[in-house]
Image (cartoon, coloured by chain):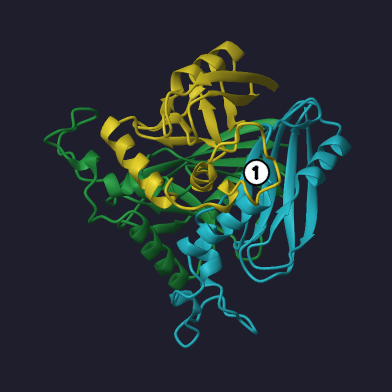
Chain colours: A yellow, B green, C cyan
Amino acid sequence: MKIIKYAIDLKTAATLDFIDVTEKIQEKIKEAGIISGIINIQSLHTTMAVLVNEAEPLLISDLKKLLEKLAPQTYQYAHDNFQVRTVNMCDGECRNGHAHAKAIHLPTSIMLNINKSGLELGRWQRVFAVELDRPRERQISLVIIGE
Amino acid sequence: MKIIKYAIDLKTAATLDFIDVTEKIQEKIKEAGIISGIINIQSLHTTMAVLVNEAEPLLISDLKKLLEKLAPQTYQYAHDNFQVRTVNMCDGECRNGHAHAKAIHLPTSIMLNINKSGLELGRWQRVFAVELDRPRERQISLVIIGE
Amino acid sequence: MKIIKYAIDLKTAATLDFIDVTEKIQEKIKEAGIISGIINIQSLHTTMAVLVNEAEPLLISDLKKLLEKLAPQTYQYAHDNFQVRTVNMCDGECRNGHAHAKAIHLPTSIMLNINKSGLELGRWQRVFAVELDRPRERQISLVIIGE
């Protein structure tokens, strides 16, 4: 049994950008030479999630609306009250309470099974990285275990 | 260390059917002969989830209501607008935007620890497959790693 | 490759207590002597979750409000109707339908990658155990696989 580590670098284009990373992950599994095993797909950010769902553009628009409704940008988050907040304040701190609030609805990491040298996915299953905050450079960490 | 793969076939009976698969999973762990390790329990569908919670029928009715409230069948999903949608359209396509929307609240896969040749579960923890769409044949993929 | 098992005992102080367990987990990884691999962090309770997010106190207050809004204590849960309920009834049974309902929004287990003898975490990522029910003694199960 082997254990192999990769990173995937991404550049998100907008708040609630859904980036289909399925093919990039498949390539890494092939590169690793793992036929059977598991892969952990982990966001390295508190305001970017990973998600398995269908790559249908109208559905993605539905899911964006739903996430916005669950944790609206218009809501007043204490995390965004920079007059009061003292912890983890950076230069140019931006209001992103909504992005953290959206994040608790979505996975930080997803473990998927590997079969026949690829992700074992159902017919419509695709893996997305979901930007919850402003667009920026992001990274996903992969660990593959198998043989 | 060994890696062993199984599938569990299910037949769901209704939308929001909660099927307790704990015993079926325990049997597979015993069959695999793994004493200590991990098991990844993965739904192979975008509209079926897996969930750990208590097997108390009234609680299950509460959770069904909550999921229906979070992503109601009565809401107009763009995914269900077959006059506009062009992607992933099948013969006899049915409105299931609500099922995908429910799915983002629940896990696609759950990793659980194995101890003493069985799932390491707390007193009330049970593993459910949750049908979010119309009743049908479904499959769960299991990968067990351990010794 | 090795597989090592640990438990972390916790004492929660209040409903919606967020306990930062990051350092305790890091210590276990060091103790295990694993340089590269994965760790599964599993709650052994149906009303305690694990979560990765930022350790900023005002943000935690936002997340508590959000969880309370999603599954309010004031809502009437069938699980709490002790005149009707017969399953899993214990001595001194308490109303905790809200805690189970909150639990479906949060992970029971989180798999994280291990790199350079520690959790591979982004800058703001911390691991929390989240008490959803009344304060009590709780336990988290850890399985580490790696080399």
Image position of C5 (left or right of B55): right
Quarter occupied by residue C131: bottom right
Residue C61 vertical placement versus A44 (above, below) = below
Q: Quadrant of the C terminus of chain A?
A: top right
Give the letter of the chain under mark 1: C
Which percent across, then down, holds residue A146? 63, 24
Task: Determine crowd level at label 1: few under 14, some 14-19, many 20+ residues with C-alpha closer than 10 A.
Answer: many
Q: For this rendering, which residue is in front, B89 or B122?
A: B89
Q: Which residue is mark 1?
A: C54
Which percent across, then down, holds residue A124? 34, 32
Image position of A39 (left or right of B65): right
Which percent across, then down, holds residue C112? 66, 36
Q: Which residue appears at 40% of the width and 62% of the height?
A: B66
Image position of B13 (left or right of A36): left
Quarter occupied by residue A108: top right
| Residue most extreme to the front | A83
Quarter occupied by residue A9: top right
Q: For this rendering, which residue is in front, A72 or A39?
A: A72
Q: Amino acid at mark 1?
A: Glu
| Residue most extreme to the left | B83
> What is the number of callouts on the image?
1
Is residue A57 among the parts visible in the rendering? yes
Is residue B118 among the parts visible in the rendering? no
Q: Quadrant of the N terminus of chain A?
A: top right
Which percent across, then down, holds residue A41? 57, 30
Residue B118 vertical placement versus B39 (above, below) = below
Q: Which residue appears at 61% of the width and 50% of the height?
A: C59
Secondary structure state at the residue bearing disc 1: loop
| Residue most extreme to the top | A31
